[in-house]
Structures are given as structure tokens and as C-alpha cells.
Image (tube, rainbow, N blue to C red):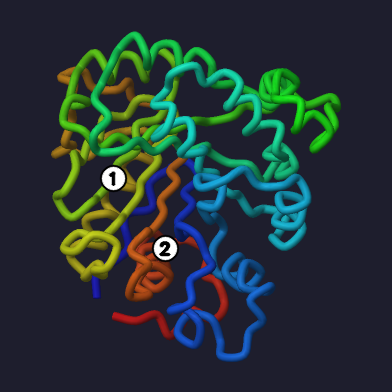
Amino acid sequence: MATRANAAPRGPIRVGISGWRYAPWRGVFYPGGLAQTRELEFAASRFDSIEINGSFYSLQHPRTYARWHAQTPANFVFALKGPRYITHMRRLRDVETPLANFFASGVLRLERKLGPLLWQFPPNFAFDAERWEQFLALLPKHAHAAGELARRCDARLRDADPPRERPRRRLRHAVEVRHESFRDEAFVALLRRHRVGLVVADTAGRWPLLEDVTADFVYVRLHGDQELYASGYGDAALDGWARRVAAWASGTEPADARRASKQRAPRLRRRAVYCYFDNDAKVHAPFDAARLRARLGLAGKRGMDDARE
């Protein structure tokens, strides 16, 4: 078993899972007989952050966000996936109203538990600098701006989550791209100018794995290193990711960072790191997440002593 990554001063690290409602997990990760309505509560007792995937497929309801908020501990953080209607269907064309609809659907009911917002793009979507500039400029940078944007939603949503004063608490955005044209210095420079994160996505070699640091946080998605969404991570792979996460959190970059830009990010005293396992098909995700947490010396969560090797 590998040793933990060194304990140098570092920013907050959250390691969790992508989604939580998977039938194959029942009786393996979730105890037999656990009510489906308690699965989020159970998962949140093991991890301090989880990605919400349902928001990618359709707009959720304010009551749903309020329930998720109530079912999780005080220090818990959700990452929230933006709608595919914006990224895959509209492909960033004329998306101001869809963005307003998204924030009017109750997103801000997560309050301080709202962590980074993830915008994932399809493999056939190539880099278009003008379209990206317009999109990144629209993204609200704090909760107050998101509330103001929500006021411009469609009429059908105007009463869903009544407007109220919102704090100027910062919002973080990260983008996951899957086309080789994004291996471009201009794209990296654009993200840095808007302080938007570039997702480090391990996709079993299918799509680009870029590690350019473009914000004061790093967002990592581990989809499987051998078989997309299905394969687990072995000891050597987890050791490697632990070293990379520790480097980012300490404000530096891995010495062998795989970057599209020749320009390194400025060194900071520390960075926040969010890391989510999306290799859920064969129930590897929660156990791999627990093993990576152990390597990073993160506070243990009860019930994961039986994490699989």
C-alpha cells in the first residue's frame, strides 16, 4: 500500500463521487435494505462533496435543491452540472435565457453548499473563440449576479423560485472539453482571463487530458483509466493522482503536467481542489474515492473501512 501524499501546506481538497443514485450500488456500497430516499444522506456521510448530474438532463425544482441541502451536513459541498440544453443542444448559441432559466430553477437554494458549476461539452464540439468569449462573459461570478440573471428567465419559471436578495458569494465555473481543437494556447488564455477552471478529465485515453491550471482551483474528473466509466484505479494510479492533487492544492503544478499552453499558471500559496470519480458502472467510484482520500490524509468517514482493493 502506498504512503500518503506529503502534508505540505495546501488548500482545501474535496474528493467525492459523480452522482449517487445507481441501482448496481445497492447492496454493494449502500447497505441492503437502505431506502432509496436515504442514499444521498448515506453517501454524504462518507464524502464531503458529490456532483449533481440530474441538472444536466433537465431543470430541477427548487424543492429538490432545498431537499438536497437539508439531507447533507453543514460543511458539505455540491458540484452542479450545467444543462446539456446549453452545451450540447444550443452549443452556446443564444444561451442567455437558458442560463437564466437554469438559475431560476432553484440552484441558489443550495446556498453555501453550492460549489463549482461544471459545464461539459460533447466530443464533436470544436473550439470557437468568439462563441466561447460570449459564453464565459455571461457566466455569473457570484450569487447576487446569478440571482439577477435568473430574473430574465422565461415566464413559466418566474414564480418557481421567487427573487430575493442574494449575497455576493463567489461562484466557480469549470469546463470539460472533449475535442482536440481545445489543445490551444488561446483557449487556455481565455479561461484564465475569465478565471474559469479547465477540468482535468481522465477518460481512458478517449478524449484530451489537459492539466493547464486556469483558475485558483482545480477540478478533476476520473472516468476510468482503462475502460471509460467502468474500470477501477489501481494502487499506482491512485498514488499518481494523489501526488497531482497534492501539488495543485499546494499552489504548484505537477512537474510532468500535460498542458496545452507553454505558459505555466502563477504559483499561489494554495489552491482548492475538487475531485470526483465517475467510474460508476461497476461500483468502483465510491471505493476508489475512499482510497484516494486516505492517500491524501483527509479526515476519514465512517463505514468505509471495507474499501475494496
Kind of residue sitting beneath label 1: Ala
Name which of mark 2 and mark 1 comes first in the sequence.
1
- The CA distance from mark 2 to mark 1 is 18 Å
Nearer to us: label 2 or label 1: 1
Query: What residue lies at 58% left-to-right and 41% top-to-bottom?
Result: 115
Give the x, y percent position of residue 132. 37, 16
In which quadrant is the N terminus drawn? bottom left
Residue underneath mark 2: 293
Residue underneath mark 1: 201
Q: Is residue 270 visible?
A: no
Q: Is residue 213 visible?
A: yes
Kind of residue sitting beneath label 2: Arg
Q: Nearer the viewer, residue 20 or 302?
A: 20
Image quadrant in which you'd find residue 96: top right
Q: Nearer the viewer, residue 63 or 70?
A: 63
Image quadrant in which you'd find residue 190: top left
**Which disc, if any, is residue 241?**
none
Q: Is 116 above or below relative to 66?
A: above
Give the x, y percent position of residue 244. 27, 47
